[in-house]
Image: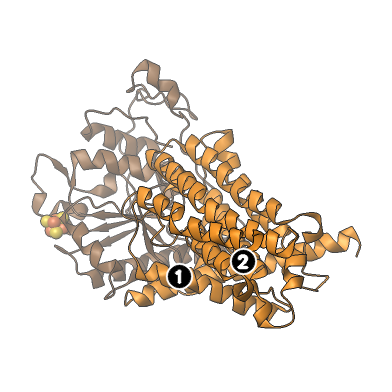
Chain colours: A orange, B brown
Amino acid sequence: MSIVAKVFWAFISLGVVTIWGLTLNGIVHKIFARVQGRLGPPVWQPFIDIFKNNAKRTAISHGIMYYLGPVFRIAGGIGTYMFIPVLFGSPYFSNFSASGDVLLVMYFIFFGQLGMALGAGEGGHPYSAIGVSRGLSQMTAFEVPFALSVISLAIQYHTLNITDIVAAQQGSFLNWTLFTNPLAVIAAMIAMLGMNMYNPFSVVIAPQEIPIGPPTEYQSAFLGLLATNRGIFNGAKLVLFMNLFFGGATNIFEMVAKTFAIYMFSVFVGAAYPRFRTEDSIRFFLKVPTLIGIASVLLFSL
Amino acid sequence: MSDIEQKDKPATQPEWVKDERTLTNSALPSEEQDWFCDARPRRVEKHWQVLENFMNWARAHSLWILAFGTGCGAIEMRPLVTARYDISRLGMQMRPTPRQASVFVIGGYVSLKTLKRIVRSYEQMQGPKFVVAVCSCAINGGMYWDSYNTIKRIDEYIPVDVYVTGCMPRPEAVLAGFNLLKKLIREGKAEGQNLYADKFDWYKANQKQVIKDWNMPDYNW
Ligand code: SF4
């Protein structure tokens, strides 16, 4: 396929994942509302919020880094997504996965957060600073089990290329990493709880405590950009997990069903548990999940 | 909307006006003056009407409330987010930061001390911004009408879109107020931000008249 066609299809798939990610956000709000006995916002509410934020007539900036924060964030989201094959075997929905491997994707996951941290810091609100310090320390903590699980996968499949990892899981569902390397999957799924930042790991946004968290000063189109990125980034993370652990997908419907199921894991945990304190959350990741991750690495390297 | 008459113009420029685009921030200590923006709020023109209609629809269906209760009436805001009234089904939510909020609910009597915070928060909200004044006290002084320490009409200090009367109004009444606000927004009639920019001198004079310890910028961007 020519590079122009590749870019064209990459943008189509970016659009698909943005819409799917935002719809998922809407569904999650609905689920949380129903758990609390409310009707909840309509499923399309995230889209209206984005339109509204972009329709604001004024916006203020606190400086260059503040301006670049959301740009880095969305660059991190798009970067993460662009190097993940969405549909296995489809020439149209494989993005640029041939040009990067899972290490690059992991780098992009954290790139956006770092950029956002710098931007939110320049906003100057104390809650932003608290949110950023909490976010970065929690990120460092859940990175450990996730990285161990990826290392375990690399040893198991002898590759870091995501397409090859998906290819190795084809055939039967018993070939999924979920069944061939359950320890790595458990470690990574617990790390995903931290990544998605629902309870008990909602220390960054922390409603009723440091409400809003890092984006406290962000408004108007800045906030619209951050909200759009939430859709892209959610979708990208879920597709990555689906590829690494749950056998990938060969058509859009399989992708939608699998990512939905993966996401519901952290939503159910989030609806059932209260919030950890920051230090408890960090200690949590460094204990059992890390040990599980080490065990999964040892299992395949010995 | 109130039909406010421009009071007789002062012969000399008030001390907060530098020229027609900038303010002096003269109430701040001199070393702090350049920490803050000194631009005056300006009128923002509407877009092409079809686009504006669509945007107004989005604004009306995504009202984010600044959760800042000013008086006893604000206690009626809490039931609105509970399972019984649940404003989230209307696309509304509480926003703890003025930067992201679009509706300011004045929840009851406004003491002079609170007025300062109200002005500051209102100016920090990004437009278009709307104000719903809940409670008789915010409308005409209510039972605080002869108090030395509260203002009577919030309308003289910031532009108000919708009033909800009562002492205190039931959550249903507040919801009805929000529905009226939605209607006004969709009809393009909720232009408080532009009203504030147009009559800035008048509003600022009123504010400065009652807030004696003015130690903030003349417009809080
Ligand atoms: S109208 Fe009644 S409830 Fe409302 S602020 Fe005044 S005294 Fe309080």
Query: On the rendered image, what quadrant is the C terminus of chain B found in?
Result: top left
> Residue at 35% across / 25% down in the picture?
B14
Q: In this view, does A246 lie above or below A154?
A: below
Callouts 2 and 1 in the same chain: yes
Q: Residue at x 33, y 30 (%)?
A: B216
Residue situated furthest front in the rendering:
A302
User: Does ligand 1 reach within 8 Å of label 1's beta carbon?
Assistant: no
**Circle 2 chain:** A
Quote the CA–CA distance across marks 2 and 1.
Answer: 15 Å
Mark 1: amino acid: Val
Mark earlier in primary sequence (2, 1): 2
Q: Nearer the viewer, residue B2 or B39?
A: B39
Identify the residue at image location x=46%, y=34%: B40
Name the residue that disc number 2 marks.
A241
Q: Is mark 2 on a helix, strand or loop?
A: helix
Question: Residue reaching furthest right?
Answer: A2
Identify the residue position indicated by label 1 in the image: A267
Residue B35, quarter of picture: top left
B78 shown above or below B210: below
Q: Residue A39, how many percent across, how many down?
A: 37, 78
Chain bearing mark 1: A
Amino acid found under the numbered disc labelled 2: Phe
